[in-house]
Image (cartoon, helix red, strand yellow):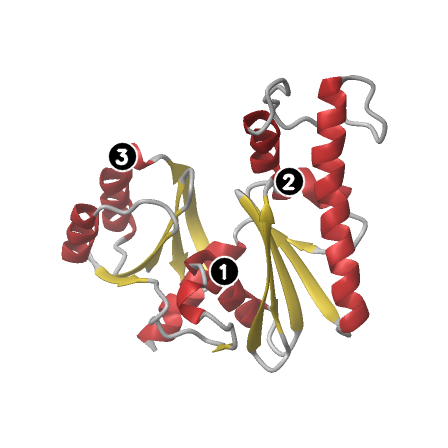
Amino acid sequence: MNIIIDIGNSRIKIAVFNGRELIHNEIFTSKMFIENTITIIEKYQCENAIISSVGSLKKSDLKVLNSKINLIKLNSDTKIPFKNNYATPKTLGVDRIALVSSAVSSFPDKNVLIIDAGTCITYDFIDMEGCYYGGAIAPGILMRYKALNNFTKKLPLLELSNSYNLIGNSTETCIHSGVILGVINEIDSAVNQYKEKIEDLTVVLTGGDLNFLANKLKNSIFANPNFLLEGLNTILTYNLN
């Protein structure tokens, strides 16, 4: 059994894989990170683990995990199942490395655009030859709401809403229109531009805002909430083999 640990900006995801099959998945905060992880390791008799962190990771926590299981900490030096043509590979986020690895595993010999709609919205492209080139990084939905509040004196901080119109008729509805339609149109426009340039493009949408965005986009996509976790399992298996 493999245990996958993904430490994000706001939460921690843990998954257990039997081969390529996801058999357990849960999300929690950092407060009980080590206790919960050890419980899962023992319950499923996990032998190997990989940890990916874009958030904070204590050295003491890493030391405890190393004592309990064969652990790989994903970084720019970890062996990966694709050719990295990124101009600054040392700065490529571990979350993006995992997403591209998942694309290689799930869609071999395909041109794939992965869109991760989370704290940031990232776009990553890998071609059918297994070569990764990069993509784009943009503010996520929550970040846009916060930016409007932080960088102005009077605009309120709003929460994501399913109620929005093209023409807002109040300050609040105008903010919802600007943020939500801005993100939707941005993603659709990016996909259209990729499709104009690249034939037979497969598009995958994942991330924390997946459920909100999936049915609002005009383009055909594969929606997969576990795409990053599957990518981490791919990297772990690749290194074990």
Secondary element at tag 3: helix
Residue ID for mark 2: 211
Mark 3 and mark 2 residues within 8 Å of each other at the beta carbon:
no
Q: Quadrant of residue 124?
A: bottom right
Left or right for 163, reference 238: right
At a point 77% along the width and 46% down the height, the residue shown is: 185
In front: label 1 or label 3: 1
The quadrant in which the N terminus is found is bottom left
- Circle 1 crowding by C-alpha within 10 Å: few under 14, some 14–19, many from 20: some
Q: Amino acid at mark 3?
A: Met
Q: Amino acid at mark 2?
A: Asn
Q: Quadrant of residue 191?
A: bottom right
- Circle 2 crowding by C-alpha within 10 Å: few under 14, some 14–19, many from 20: some
Disc number placed over residue 32 in the picture, else none:
3
Residue ID for mark 1: 96
Q: Does residue 164 appear in the picture of this structure?
A: yes
In front: label 2 or label 1: 1
- The residue nearer to you, when weighing 182 against 198, is 182
